[in-house]
Amino acid sequence: MRRVISLIAAAMVIFGEALWAQSPEGADIAFQTKVIDLGTLWQDDDKQVVRLQYTNTGDVPLVVTEVRTSCSCTTVRHDRGKVMPGERGVLNITMDPSKAPEGSFYRVLQVYSTAKSGVHHITLKAEIKK
Protein backbone atom coordinates (compact mmCIF):
# COMPACT_ATOMS: atom_id res chain seq x y z
CA MET A 1 0.00 0.00 0.00
CA ARG A 2 2.87 2.37 0.80
CA ARG A 3 4.25 1.73 -2.63
CA VAL A 4 0.98 2.71 -4.32
CA ILE A 5 0.76 5.91 -2.27
CA SER A 6 4.40 6.76 -3.11
CA LEU A 7 3.75 6.22 -6.83
CA ILE A 8 0.64 8.39 -6.72
CA ALA A 9 2.48 11.13 -4.84
CA ALA A 10 5.37 11.03 -7.35
CA ALA A 11 2.95 11.22 -10.27
CA MET A 12 1.21 14.21 -8.69
CA VAL A 13 4.52 16.04 -8.24
CA ILE A 14 5.57 15.40 -11.86
CA PHE A 15 2.13 16.36 -13.21
CA GLY A 16 2.03 19.48 -11.02
CA GLU A 17 5.44 20.64 -12.27
CA ALA A 18 4.30 20.20 -15.85
CA LEU A 19 1.25 22.37 -15.18
CA TRP A 20 3.29 25.12 -13.50
CA ALA A 21 6.05 25.20 -16.11
CA GLN A 22 6.03 28.48 -18.01
CA SER A 23 5.08 28.28 -21.63
CA PRO A 24 6.77 30.59 -24.15
CA GLU A 25 5.17 34.03 -24.36
CA GLY A 26 6.17 34.75 -27.95
CA ALA A 27 8.52 36.85 -30.03
CA ASP A 28 8.76 40.61 -29.64
CA ILE A 29 10.72 43.31 -31.37
CA ALA A 30 12.54 46.42 -30.13
CA PHE A 31 14.01 48.95 -32.54
CA GLN A 32 17.14 51.04 -32.12
CA THR A 33 14.91 54.05 -32.85
CA LYS A 34 11.41 54.65 -34.20
CA VAL A 35 12.26 57.97 -35.93
CA ILE A 36 15.01 58.34 -38.54
CA ASP A 37 15.89 61.97 -39.27
CA LEU A 38 17.89 62.36 -42.48
CA GLY A 39 18.25 66.12 -42.02
CA THR A 40 18.33 68.42 -45.05
CA LEU A 41 18.76 66.74 -48.44
CA TRP A 42 18.95 68.10 -51.97
CA GLN A 43 17.01 66.35 -54.72
CA ASP A 44 20.26 65.72 -56.60
CA ASP A 45 21.93 64.07 -53.57
CA ASP A 46 22.89 60.40 -53.64
CA LYS A 47 20.54 57.79 -52.25
CA GLN A 48 20.56 57.70 -48.46
CA VAL A 49 21.03 54.27 -46.86
CA VAL A 50 20.22 53.63 -43.21
CA ARG A 51 20.82 50.38 -41.32
CA LEU A 52 18.19 50.13 -38.61
CA GLN A 53 18.88 47.41 -36.06
CA TYR A 54 16.22 45.61 -34.08
CA THR A 55 16.38 43.02 -31.32
CA ASN A 56 14.16 40.03 -30.59
CA THR A 57 13.19 40.71 -26.97
CA GLY A 58 10.86 37.73 -26.81
CA ASP A 59 11.50 34.10 -25.94
CA VAL A 60 10.85 32.42 -29.31
CA PRO A 61 12.32 33.10 -32.79
CA LEU A 62 11.14 36.27 -34.58
CA VAL A 63 10.58 36.63 -38.32
CA VAL A 64 10.07 39.97 -40.09
CA THR A 65 7.56 38.99 -42.75
CA GLU A 66 7.11 42.27 -44.63
CA VAL A 67 7.99 45.97 -44.56
CA ARG A 68 5.68 48.35 -46.40
CA THR A 69 6.64 51.86 -47.42
CA SER A 70 4.33 54.74 -48.19
CA CYS A 71 6.13 55.97 -51.33
CA SER A 72 8.26 54.79 -54.24
CA CYS A 73 11.20 56.92 -53.06
CA THR A 74 11.86 54.52 -50.16
CA THR A 75 12.72 50.83 -50.30
CA VAL A 76 13.56 48.37 -47.54
CA ARG A 77 15.52 45.12 -47.54
CA HIS A 78 15.25 42.97 -44.44
CA ASP A 79 16.55 39.72 -43.03
CA ARG A 80 14.23 36.92 -44.12
CA GLY A 81 15.39 34.32 -41.62
CA LYS A 82 14.62 33.76 -37.97
CA VAL A 83 16.09 36.07 -35.37
CA MET A 84 16.60 34.09 -32.19
CA PRO A 85 15.71 35.52 -28.74
CA GLY A 86 18.25 38.17 -27.73
CA GLU A 87 19.74 38.40 -31.24
CA ARG A 88 19.63 41.31 -33.67
CA GLY A 89 18.41 41.80 -37.19
CA VAL A 90 18.71 44.71 -39.63
CA LEU A 91 16.40 46.70 -41.88
CA ASN A 92 18.33 48.29 -44.78
CA ILE A 93 16.36 51.41 -45.68
CA THR A 94 17.17 53.29 -48.90
CA MET A 95 15.69 56.71 -49.59
CA ASP A 96 16.14 58.35 -53.02
CA PRO A 97 15.90 62.17 -52.69
CA SER A 98 15.44 62.56 -56.47
CA LYS A 99 12.05 60.81 -56.17
CA ALA A 100 10.93 62.72 -53.09
CA PRO A 101 8.79 65.85 -53.22
CA GLU A 102 10.30 69.19 -52.24
CA GLY A 103 9.63 70.36 -48.68
CA SER A 104 9.04 68.51 -45.43
CA PHE A 105 9.28 64.78 -46.01
CA TYR A 106 7.59 62.32 -43.63
CA ARG A 107 7.03 58.70 -44.52
CA VAL A 108 5.96 55.78 -42.37
CA LEU A 109 7.37 52.27 -42.71
CA GLN A 110 5.08 49.49 -41.52
CA VAL A 111 7.03 46.53 -40.14
CA TYR A 112 5.07 43.26 -40.06
CA SER A 113 6.51 40.37 -38.10
CA THR A 114 5.66 37.48 -35.82
CA ALA A 115 6.03 39.80 -32.81
CA LYS A 116 3.19 39.60 -30.31
CA SER A 117 3.09 43.42 -30.21
CA GLY A 118 1.79 43.59 -33.79
CA VAL A 119 2.69 46.02 -36.57
CA HIS A 120 5.39 48.59 -35.79
CA HIS A 121 5.75 51.98 -37.42
CA ILE A 122 9.07 53.65 -38.22
CA THR A 123 9.03 57.31 -39.29
CA LEU A 124 11.48 58.54 -41.88
CA LYS A 125 11.80 62.31 -42.12
CA ALA A 126 13.87 64.91 -43.97
CA GLU A 127 13.74 68.37 -45.46
CA ILE A 128 14.03 68.08 -49.26
CA LYS A 129 15.35 71.03 -51.27
CA LYS A 130 15.68 71.57 -55.02
Image (tube, rainbow, N blue to C red):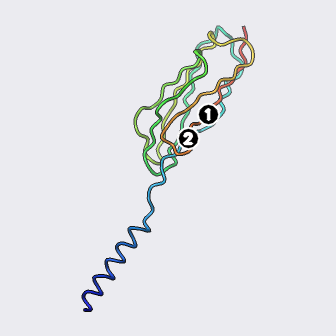
The disc at residue 121 is 1
Nearest to the eye among marks 1 and 2: give it: 2
Residue 69 to residue 113: above or below? above
Q: Secondary structure at mark 1?
A: strand
Residue 51 to residue 99: above or below? below
In the rendered image, which quarter is residue 111 located in? top right
Q: Residue at x 55, y 40 (%)?
A: 118
The disc at residue 23 is none
Quarter of the image that includes the N terminus: bottom left
In the rendered image, which quarter is residue 93 located in? top right
Residue 115, image x, y percentages: 51, 43
55 or 2: which is nearer to us?
2
35 or 15: which is nearer to us?
15
Q: Residue at x 36, y 72 (%)?
A: 15
Residue 4 lies left or right of residue 94; in this view the side is: left
Which residue is denoted by mark 2 in the rendering?
A: 118
Quarter of the image that includes the C terminus: top right
**How many numbered circles does the render carry?**
2
Q: Residue at x 54, y 43 (%)?
A: 29
Q: Residue at x 29, y 86 (%)?
A: 6
Q: Type of residue at label 1?
A: His
Crowding at mark 2 (Cα within 10 Å: few <14, some 14-19, many 20+): few
Residue furthest bottom in the image: 1
Q: Secondary structure at mark 2?
A: loop
Residue 71, image x, y percentages: 60, 18
Q: How far apart are the alpha carbons under marks 1 and 2?
A: 10 Å
Residue 114 lies left or right of residue 37; in this view the side is: left
